[in-house]
Amino acid sequence: MTVLDHRPTAPVPSWLPDATGPRSDPAPLLPDTSPVRVLGTPELAKYDPELLRDLYRRLVVGRRYNQQATTLTKQGRLAVYPSSTGQEACEVAAATVLGADDWLFPSYRDTLAVVGRGVDPLAALTLLRGSAHTGYDPRITRTAPLCTPLATQAPHAVGLAHAARLRGEPVVALAMLGDGGTSEGDFHEALNFAAVLNAPVVFLVQNNGYAISVPLTKQSAAPSLAHKAVGYGMPGRLVDGNDAVAVHAVLAEAVDRARAGGGPTLVEALTYRLEAHTNADDATRYRVPDEVEAWRAHDPLVLMERHLREAGLLDDEAVARAAEEAEALAATMRAQFHAEPQFDPLSLFQHVYAEPTPQLREQAAQLAAELAAEQMDGQTAGQTDGQTGAGA
């Protein structure tokens, strides 16, 4: 059999990129050979003790937040809740590395990060309560609405960051995704556009091992999800997602790089959700107890408390204060969700288009008429009942 040699014999055309240029060397873009860790290493001594204690406090409050939100689903106060228990280090770090003018683009599991940005818990959980598409103003909070379709917030993050840069604003956008989100076309499009446009965006992939019930091995054959960055022309970083200090450090470096004009970064945080996908999921159908217990031994809250105590940076008084703050948040959440939500049916027609279409105006008018008729019928029925009672 004849083997044809298809290698070119002519000189490389001058219009092709220089083969010796920086684009030909992927080494600077390759991710860390092992996940970045700080807890339990000498590197911990380099960090501000106040930052470390604040991260611990946020982890304690975040764990209680997850517990209370899960309880609210059992009480019927929330329609669904995707818990981030076990992933709090990623949530806390994402909320704290951004500046006041930066933007967060969360997924449906990232309500803790949203609350960490200062959004009221009731407002952050409005979508999951089923009351409205979102409970907060994205423009005021600089936080996009929770995104339930996988990865569709990622291109939005790129577009906003690119537009801000064109206006001369030093804004960075942080898009949060799960490992399942990396299997979506929106993820590819977002990373490709971000790299081509050199947009100031950071992509944080919380790799918790499962896209609902599908393990990572059935999602990707890449050495790591961080390796996907190389194909788009941006650096990839790999970090221990249960090490709050490490996640904060890696994300802060990526945010600073983006703000300085260095372009986007893909960060993969290796973590694990200790709870089911949502309260509607039975995780025992696809996970064995030994796996869960092995990750429970690497609990981000337990790790943080142990290592800070060993370093003499945390005492019983600080632990008690954090616990009190956590309980106060839980009490606030219970009080907020005790009241039934008030709905305005006509709000369905708001914010659909900048200018309502004739069809929307017609539908809104029809609904307003039906609501007015129902109210009038109710008043008439009440008057009739009153007259009947008086006559009796």
Image (cartoon, grey):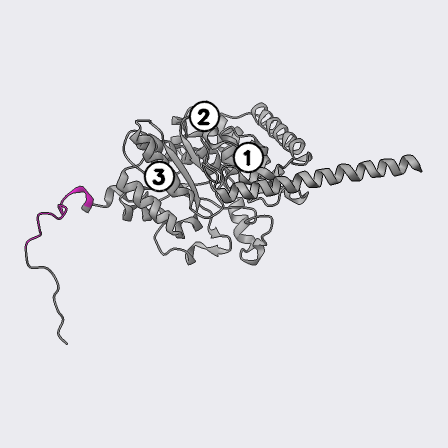
Residue interval drawn in magenta:
11-23
Camera-nearest residue between 311 and 243: 243
Q: Of the residues shown, which amino acid type is indicated by label 3?
A: Val
First-in-chain label (3 vs 1): 1
Q: Residue at point 62% right, 26% down? A: 324
Image x and y of residue 381, in percent: 79, 40
SS assignment at label 1: loop
Q: Residue at point 40% right, 51% down? A: 184
Q: Which residue is mark 1?
A: 135
| Residue 128 visible in the displayed image | yes
Residue contact at pointers 2 and 1, CB within 8 angstroms: no
Mark 2: give few (<14), some (14-19) or many (20+) Cα within 10 Å: few
Residue contact at pointers 2 and 3, CB within 8 angstroms: no
Q: Which residue is mark 2?
A: 51
First-in-chain label (2 vs 1): 2
SS assignment at label 3: helix
3D distance between C-alphas at marks 3 and 1? 23 Å
3D distance between C-alphas at marks 2 and 1? 30 Å
| Residue 311 visible in the displayed image | no
Note whether 76 is above or below 288 in the view shown: above
Q: Of the residues shown, which amino acid type is indicated by label 2?
A: Leu
The quarter of the picture where residue 71 lies is top right
The quarter of the picture where residue 21 lies is top left
3D distance between C-alphas at marks 2 and 3? 29 Å
Note whether 326 is above or below 78 in the view shown: above
Look at the image and tell me in which quarter the N terminus lies: bottom left
Counting every numbered tag in the picture gives 3
Image x and y of residue 183, in percent: 40, 52
Image x and y of residue 255, in percent: 35, 32
Q: Which residue is mark 3?
A: 158
Camera-nearest residue between 196 and 28: 196
Q: Is residue 392 left or right of residue 240?
A: right
